[in-house]
Amino acid sequence: MTGTILFDPLIPWPLLAVVAALAVAGVALALWRGLSGWALRGMAALVVLAALAGPVYQQEDRAPLSDIVVMIEDESASQHLSDRPEQMEAAETLAARIAARENTELRRVRVGDGEGDSGTALMTALSEALAEEPSARVAGIIALSDGLVHDMDRAPDLPAPLHLLMTGREDDWDRRLIVANAPAFAIIGEPVTLTLRIEDSGAAPDLGPVAPLEISIDGEEPQTVQLPIGQDIEIPVTLPHGGRNVLQFTVPEAEGELTDRNNTALIQMNGVRDRLRVLLVSGEPHPGGRTWRNLLKSDSSVDLVHFTILRPPEKQDGVPVDELSLIAFPTRELFLEKIDDFDLIIFDRYKRRGILPAIYLDNVSNYVEKGGAVLVAAGPDFATADSIYRSPLARVLPAEPTARVIEERYVPKVTGTGQRHPVTSDLRDGESWGAWLRQIEIEGLAGHEVMTGAEDRPLLILDRVGEGRVALLASDHAWLWNRGYEGGGPQLELLRRLAHWMMKEPELEEEALWAEATGQTMRIIRRTLDEEIGAVTITTPSGEEVEIELEEVSPGRFEALWRGPEIGLYRLAEGEQEAVIGLGPAAPREFERTIASAEVMAPAIEAMRGGALRLEGGLPQIRSVREGRPAAGRGWIGLTPREAYETRSVTRASLLPPWLVLLLAAGFITAGWLREGRR
């Protein structure tokens, strides 16, 4: 129980002050005039003023409240390095000591890794913990951490001293690989310059001025170069293929370093072609001739060389072939010397006329077998004796003409294989396509038949020959779709896909395995022409193998979602298909700095005169200190007792009850009157 005198005035304090001033003036006047009862009159005025002030005696029944100590335990990834988990076991001993203190409660808050790659959000956790506690009861905050906090901008106003008990050791050191710049795209075959740096921190020993760096692309055998330590070095890297390339840079773990988790950097870079070089050879002029030219010229990344034969075949006047143009066309340079510079050669209604000798066409076949691409858009001449099939090019063509030209209306259809092939899958509804009016009858010999036409005869055949690709379109009426005949069709989309498939664009591979990463989750995608596939085997960075079954989401496309347990390079395999993908950031934020330090948290610690001590030297003693005094010293930390309490009940008693006021005031006034009257 505690007692306190309080005032509850009957009139406002300003008005009471005016009344007091009038009373003092009256007493002063009586004294000036020599009235003998002035003192008694003054006592009467004082009683009245005291009554107006309303003095009360208040008694409170108080229950003392315990002090609260907040203990934050950092369990982020960097706290699992070296012997830090063993050092964190001291938290149990410290918790027992705090709980054993008289009138003290403990609040334990555990902090893990932040969402994504946000690092250690210790201050965010502290803000949330303090928001749930009355600040008047918080006697101290103790953080068990390496001090490497990543959200200091969210530090709250502290009601009590903050102490940092650091894990780690004085002689810790670490080596880290830093990739300063990593572009998202690079041109295939051209070197891109990356800036790398090997940096030692902490009590690093002298291991020499250089360190080995291993460079691997898509998990292939790494190449090793020597890099100086502590210097930015530019390294040229050439991407071998289009699409995603996974580059892995690794510095071997040095003896005694804290961790090798920051010795590896994963970079995923898309390879793009600088220019796609296409040679278009047009035979007899026809309405669809401009279709190919417009398609290829509309793509700014395509360099087109168009070779057109304008002389009609029926005109025979004995003029030598080499004199049929205003300028000499460089056929030798194109088909012998520079042929390997082209990504695609298109023969559009071309037939043998003696302009391209057999040796040139034989060289085209060799070009395909070595990795080139040829597309034949066949017209009526493909079925004649002058057909391009009656040349050395026949050994790479997937089908043979029967000499029959079908002149009838038909609507092209996508076959079952075509529905699974990326060139013809997902084309808009075939039921609304317009008709074509001519088709060359061919007999399939090899490859995949993805479209059919009149009489369900093969219309579009795709094939792989050696390392190259060949496509045969058995009609020259694709241009009808472009003109909107009977509603038209996806002519532009079909021909563009066809050209890009032949130029080996990764997104159009019919047999492919790849994965797309979102944080630590990967979407595994397998595209195939087969009806079924086996399980995908995933090899984690630690070497563990996991098998995942995929489900068919559309014809020829199988998918599955899987969350990787760790950051690093994952290898995927299914049959002959292999892929690699990196999960997590190139340099995880938790491992950018690994040497324990109080530097980051110093502003918050110094604000309330807290301290930073190492757990390496043992647990500190806990003392009670007054508010505003230094709260830490050598081997000890301080808590500030708050002496908070809870009021259970309040009672009030008036010090001047009305009857007493009336009695005293009347007595003093009467006494004063009698004294003045006797005189």
Image (cartoon, rainbow, N blue to C red):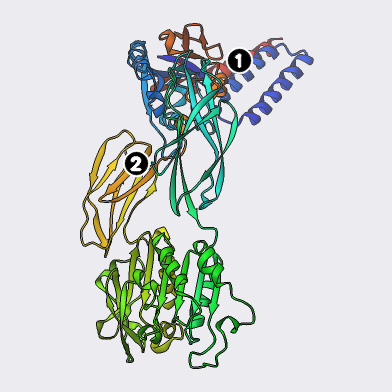
SS class of the residue under badge 1? helix
Direction right: furthest residue: 32
Q: Say if residue 127 shows up in the picture.
A: no
Discs 1/2, front:
2
Instruction: Write down the quadrant of residue 66 in the picture.
Output: top left
Q: Nearer the viewer, residue 252 or 305?
A: 305
Left or right: residue 256 versus residue 537 is: right
Instruction: From the top left corner, tell me how far across and down residue 93 is, in percent.
Output: 33, 12
Instruction: Examine the rendered structure and indicate whether residue 184 appears above or below residue 249.
Output: below
Instruction: Examine the rendered structure and indicate whether residue 291 appears above or below residue 340.
Output: below
Distance (Cα) linking label 1 and label 2: 101 Å
Q: Nearer the viewer, residue 396 or 574?
A: 396
Indicate which disc residue 668 carries: 1
Q: Say if residue 227 shows up in the picture.
A: yes
Instruction: From the top left corner, tell me how far across and down residue 257 is, in percent.
Output: 44, 20
Q: Nearer the viewer, residue 563 or 382?
A: 382
Label 1 packing within 10 angstroms: few (<14), some (14-19), many (20+): many
Sequence order check: which comes first, mark 1 or mark 2? 2
Instruction: From the top left corner, tell me how far across and down residue 144 is, in percent.
Output: 42, 20
Which image quarter holds the N terminus? top left
Which image quarter holds the C terminus? top right
Label 2 packing within 10 angstroms: few (<14), some (14-19), many (20+): many
Instruction: Examine the rendered structure and indicate whether residue 307 appears above or below residue 520.
Output: below
What type is the residue that disc 1 sits on? Phe
Indicate which disc residue 261 carries: none
Instruction: Write down the quadrant of residue 143 in the picture.
Output: top left
Instruction: From the top left corner, tell me how far across and down residue 614 is, in percent.
Output: 46, 13
Instruction: Write down the quadrant of residue 352 in the picture.
Output: bottom left
What type is the residue that disc 2 sits on? Tyr
Q: Which residue is mark 2?
A: 570
State the residue at coordinates (43%, 60%): 505
Instruction: Examine the rendered structure and indicate whether residue 508 appears above or below residue 377.
Output: above
